[in-house]
Image: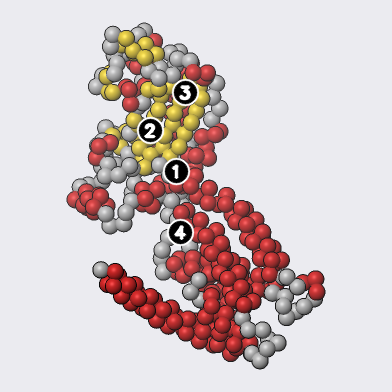
Amino acid sequence: MDGKKSKKSHCMKYCYSRYEGALESVFGRLGIVINRFPVLIMISCIFVNCALMIGFLRLESEKDVEVLYTPHDSQSSKDRAFLKTHFPDPMVQNFMQYQLPDFGRYADVMVMSKEGTSMKSNMFFGELREIDNFIKKAVLLAGNNGSLNYLEDVCAIQFGQCSVFGDVVLTQQFEKDFLSNNVTFPSYNGTLLSLFLASSESKNGLLLSANGVKLRYYLRQNTTFLSQWEVNFLSKMPEFKTNYTELSYSTSESLGIELEKNTNGDILFFSLTFTIMLTYASFASASSILECNNIANRILLGFAGVLGPILAIGSAIGFVSAIGIQFTSIVGVMPFLVIGIGIDDMFILMSGMTEGPSLTTPSSINDRMKYMFRRTGLQ
């Protein structure tokens, strides 16, 4: 039994040594080629990378969280496509929430009474209706032909009007019944109140108090200016000043927008990281800078070790953008990983050059390049 294990181990070591030797030979030849045509290879690499960076002109980003985190060509995606193909768009007329094949597009507004008190007051309901009117009339978008597009031009239609989840609290009848403790709970006139009332309290089937309400304005998905309306909604809502309520708002695109903000916010840190890496790599490789030894000084190698990964990142993003692949916020971490790996490889190559044959002995630069690539190519 031990003999079989020893024979198997010997066979594996032999195969590994043959595999390692073949790769070392390939990397050695690569070092020879680079040594023979250094200027041509440098110019070619820079030209190819810059040419691929032209793809940045077609750079597009994908912010839809559902698209980003749903597996491509999954069964759920196929079922959703089937529903969209065989069933008519429910948003144009007679819309019901359960008809949506996905999360849909919407604008959310959460209205809370100040200091956590109950919303049982005429002032709260008056301001609540002012907020609703502001969303319907003040949040607008100018069309290409000079027309103004309001909420009614982008909202999902239910019973001939915009579908607003929780709109029962906007009615005068609900206000009257609530103030007189005549609102049944959890269901009121066929509407389940517990879905959109905050911190609700009830007793004997009657609603006693609540601290706030959440309204959801469902939007159509087939309008060309829907995304612009959502952006305008987010920019307009801060203009509404409240007296008796505290206002929070979001849209179906808010999570994607915030993720993109996080990525854009990392640009400053990326620039700082790049500067620190470049400075460290340059000084760490300039061991003989004080002696003015231009042969032993490798400060330019430090620059190259940092600039190389930067060119690789730019060309990679440019290439995939050119062939139509969209940029996602998750890819924003790639530069940090690539720069870290690239600088590590640069120090490994410099270590291999240091261990190579000295120029004071009968050896050429060609021998040093060959040794360096053979020594470090597999690491």
Q: Residues within 10 Å of mark 2 (few under 14, many from 20)?
A: many
Q: Is residue 374 above or below residue 217?
A: below
Q: Which mark is residue 327?
A: 4
Mark 1: amino acid = Leu
How dense is the environment of label 1, judged by Cα within 10 Å: few (below 14), some, or many (20 and up)?
Answer: some
- What residue is pinned by disc 1? 255
For the point 56% across and 85% down, the residue is 370
Q: Relative to the observer, which residue lies in front, 337 or 363? A: 363
Q: Secondary structure at mark 4?
A: loop
In the picture of the structure, the residue carrying the numbered disc 2 is: 216
Q: Amino acid at mark 3?
A: Met
Measured Cα–Cα span from mark 2 to mark 4: 30 Å
Task: Identify the residue shown where x is 50% and y is 28%.
Answer: 247
Mark 2 against mark 3, which lies toward the viewer? Answer: 3
Separation of marks 1 and 3 at Cα, in angstroms: 22 Å
N-term mark: 4 or 3: 3
Query: Can you tell which of label 2 and label 1 is closer to the viewer?
Result: 1
Residue situated furthest bottom in the rendering? 362
Q: CA distance from mark 2 to mark 1?
A: 16 Å
Tell me the element at label 3. strand
Residue occupied by mark 3: 112
